[in-house]
Amino acid sequence: MEKKAPRVAYGETLLELGKENPDIVVLDADLSGSTKTALFAKEFPDRFFNMGIAEQNMITTAAGLATVGKIPFASSFAIFATGRAWEMVRQAVCLGNKNVKIVATHAGLTVGEDGATHQALEDIAVTRVLPHLTVIVPADYYETGKAIRFAASYNGPVYVRLPRSATPVIFDETYEFIHGKARILQKGSDVSIFACGVMVAEALAATEFLKKDGIEAEVINVSTLKPLDTETILKSVAKTGHAVTVEEHNIIGGLGSAVAETLCEGGPVPLHRIGVKEKFGRSGKADDLLKAYGLTAANIAKETGSFLNS
Amino acid sequence: MNQDEVKRLKALARKFRREIVEMVYTAQSGHPGGSLSIIDILTYLFFHEMKYPVKNRDVFSTDRLVMSKGHATPALYSCLAEKGFFPEAELKRFRQIDSILQGHPENEFVPGVDVTTGSLGQGFPQAVGMALGMRLAGSDKHVFAIMGDGECQEGIIWEAAMSAGHYKTDKLTAVVDLNGLQIDGNVKDVMNVNPVPDKFAASHWHVQEIDGHDFNEIDKAVRTAHAVTDKPSVIIAHTVKGKGVSFMENNYKFHGSPPNDEQFKIAMKELAP
């Protein structure tokens, strides 16, 4: 299966947007090579601000740039952009309702060898709770490009969560991103598997294992975590009667929580959450980490099977 | 600055001092001390220095002021009301449930407020961002950021100072309201942030120190700051917390406490026109 890194789509799209709109400016905190904002920086050095290793200042400065009509994209690793700078995201960006785009890379376990200090497993939780902020977790390279284009056109604060790794290509250049819309990627009748980000490809692959056991799984790409497409979620579980969530994030506060909240209020069905449980990450190769934390197609299929049989 | 102008500004500042005390007294909540220490500088900036229109506030015609020490809302709001951003009557509803006048400045609520501040340290970097954005747009307008000396204990102040020095935001002037007091007592006892001027100088800023209650000194310092074209400027304003109300002066207890009935009467008498 072809793999492409979503963060490359970010860098490429940012460069295109920079050519189209002179108001787009970019800030980074000494990670422009990794976040791929370096592509923009090279072409538009006057509109690129390297803020050094000072993420709180980067986010707050971005709010100031938005105040005078610029469209700032601020990038770092997810743990720093949302964790280190959380209260700046809260007050300056969200309470101030500024047109700031926070695009963070290196979210989740697939950061790999750098280990737990650099693996954000809490960023969806701490961004989803903030009023005014929309939270987007694209599933692949192509959805990332479209989500970034959406972010530039949307008037208000946006958080986009991207991984470090190259991930399986699911869509193509004709894909259309619809903000706030969850997409059924595969229809099924026995269980609804809700996934986001890196886990969408794993969830799709899991359906092959489940088919062998006679289980028809529906896979839904929940790429907008907020506002959440509760209609699509409730419609799917009304049909299947069972819900599974899969995320490269702690099961507390992320997709699993968002779906649980929806089901409890809108029509409870049994739910099984797959994700990181009461743990930090650790060092290792991305694939080995996903295996160790049960975030593989094989394990998703296994847990889904036992959940349906329980 | 001619003496008639000084007289006009002094009278305005005196009016604002009455409004500050009245707002905090009426709400029985708010921050009088740091509002009274900064009000002379704010009066100068809003009513002598800045182009600060109520309408058509585009980057080419509007100077900006960021109240990074956001708790000084009584001072800020009295100036904005005088400017005509909202009716003066609204000042009496400061901090009440149905008022636009939030406890700390919020751009979504208060006309004339560009950025939200209150959690200390976050206004200053936004002012730096505004200066960077205005320079990109080709504007020659100026950005003023008002900080407290206690606020300078926040690490982000020095991150922002570093970045403004690095990017040489010459149309940015910071004012540090150095009144020497914070909630828990003397700044030098709680956490000695001094020497503030040296720290800015080390971050590549042009530094001046003035008496923050002397309009001639304020005027001279702002004129000098405008003349500096290769770096940002900071004016370290030595001020008296609670200035103008005898029992509030240099009394850290009036950082965030309202006067009682008797104290209010005394204060209004002292600040009578």
Image: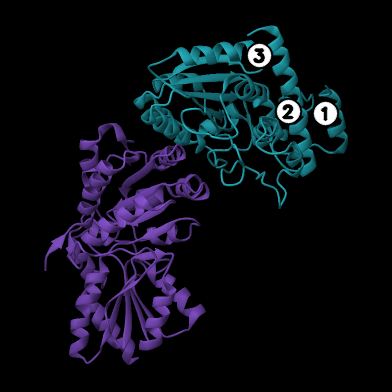
Chain colours: A purple, B cyan
The answer for how far apart the CA atoms under marks 3 and 2 are is: 16 Å
Amino acid identity at mark 2: Phe
At label 2, counting other C-alpha atoms closer than 10 Å, the crowd grade (few under 14, some 14-19, many 20 or more) is many
The N terminus of chain A - image quarter? bottom left
Residue B128: x and y, percent? 44, 31
Q: Nearer the viewer, mark 2 or mark 1?
A: 2
Which of the two residues, B214 or B238, is positioned nearer the viewer here?
Answer: B214
User: In front here: A10 or A191?
Assistant: A10
Where residue B135 appears, as percent x and y from the top left, is 39, 27
Separation of marks 3 and 1 at Cα, in angstroms: 21 Å
CB under 8 Å between discs 3 and 2: no
Q: Which residue is mark 3?
A: B214
Q: Residue at x 70, y 18 (%)?
A: B9
- Specify few, some or many for label 1: CA neighbours under 10 Å numbering under 14, 14-19, or 20 or more: many
The three-letter amino acid code for the residue at tag 1 is Ala
Q: How many marks?
A: 3
Q: Which residue is mark 2?
A: B16
Q: Which residue is mark 1?
A: B267
Q: Chain of mark 3?
A: B
Q: Output the chain of dot 1.
A: B
Rendered position, A210 above or below B188: below
- The answer to whether B4 appears left or right of A211 in the picture is right
